[in-house]
Image: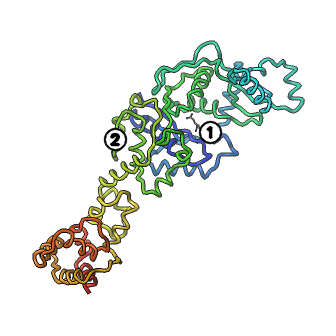
Amino acid sequence: MSHTTRFAPSPTGRLHVGNIRTALHNWMLAQKAGGDFILRIDDTDAARSREEYVEAIRADLAWLGIEATREERQSQRLDRYQAAFDALRNAGRIYPAYETSQELELKRKVQLGRGLPPIYDRAALDLTEEQRAAKEAEGIAPHWRFKLDHDEAIAWEDGVRGKASFDPATLSDPVIRRADGSWLYMLPSTVDDVDMGVTQVLRGEDHVSNTAVQIQMFTAMGATPPAFAHEALLVGKEGKLSKRLGSLGCDAFRERGIEPEAIIALLARLGTSLPVEPIADRAELLDTFDLSTFGRAPAKFDDADLERVNTAIVHAMPFEAVKHRLPEGMDEAGWHAVQPNVSNMSEVGEWWRLVTGPIQQPGFSEDDRAFLAQAADALVWGDDPWRALTSALKEATGRKGKQLFLPLRQALTGMDHGPDMGELLPLIGEGEARARLEKAGG
Ligand code: GLU
């Protein structure tokens, strides 16, 4: 059966690694089952939502290659929420409440002081018609709560957590609409999931109690709830929810030269029983993607894992996949020469500069200068000029090992280490190589 999934960010900030993971898993669920993956912009909070974040979310997802089949916006669906609200209100499932936030806070404090859970006491349900009219005459507009049905436990089979069950009496009737008429998250999300035919809701376990409430909303609207799965949260490597992760997003990854494929490979498997491997082929990741491999322990995000996966992916990247990102003039041979020496793409330019120059040679001893001058004369250009040069010099001077190779490398590249000289020398070219040797020998 095909799956319809959604990723529903609020455009009140940039995506961070935690939401990227949720987006990815929803995309994978839909890809694997051949269904739709909807990007739903949860922008009912007009004061905090910003268009620039909507654009940034789209751009980040595009960079990651997590493309939505379609996009929906809550701000364009307000009439749908109103219709659902009216129907639920007529059915007695929504009621007005007049407490101020100070009054609610006081109630909570009293309950906590008595050692009771701070659950809304439903006082508003006991108001008479006259009492309500009196509040409104005083100019107090109501906010609105969804009335939970306390008759039976709310149960579902969670795709990650297994059997889940909630006693509705342990939950407050949620406020779904503010006094100014604006919407809170709970009802619009449920209406959308019904209207958009969402079949699987996969999100963080911080939403578990929302799911309990929303299951009652689906039922109250006469709809079958989707399948739910709640993944364990992403934490820092020290095992705690970390502020840093909450602000770590695509810009920071890009700046560090992290490939989208490395992020995908890591996040696809972090927190699952499958090993994190540098798999750049999404089909392979999709093949093994399975909610039953997800564990309940928090998934630990460690930058060192990301770097390791990134380096391995860069080391395996074919020329065709990177050619549009290489420095001007760098061809396939150039890529192969520097590829093993870079841990990310931002380092390519530094190594390529050894070929294009200018380079900075170190000071050489007199002995080395004579040797390098001899090298300039010994240079002959054939199939493998490095091998030819080093064997001729070895023979002529008796030098070997470091004594033979280091001054040559330093004279030709200005560095003590770097890409394989056999690959680099042909790229430097005969004229330039001779000039560098002569300069060092002079
Ligand atoms: N906008 C909600 C959030 O970002 C969506 C939650 C959901 O997936 O239903 O938390």
Spatial CA span between label 1 and label 2:
32 Å
- Is 137 positioned to the left or the right of 198 in the image? right
Image coordinates for residue 378, horizontal then vertical, percent: 15, 81
Which element carries disc 2, helix, strand or loop? helix
Q: Nearer the viewer, residue 259 or 361?
A: 361
Work out whether residue 303 or residue 416 is closer to the camera in this orientation and state it.
416
Q: Earlier in the sequence, mark 1 or mark 2?
A: 1
Q: Is residue 424 visible?
A: yes
The disc labelled 1 sits on which kind of residue? Gln
Task: Point out the image quarter for the C terminus.
Answer: bottom left
- The nearer-to-camera label among 1 and 2 is 2
Q: Depth check: 298 or 217 in front?
A: 298
Which residue sits at x=40%, y=28%? 292
Q: Which residue is mark 2?
A: 283
Amino acid bearing label 2: Ala
> Which residue was labeled with disc 1?
74
Quarter containing the N terminus = top left
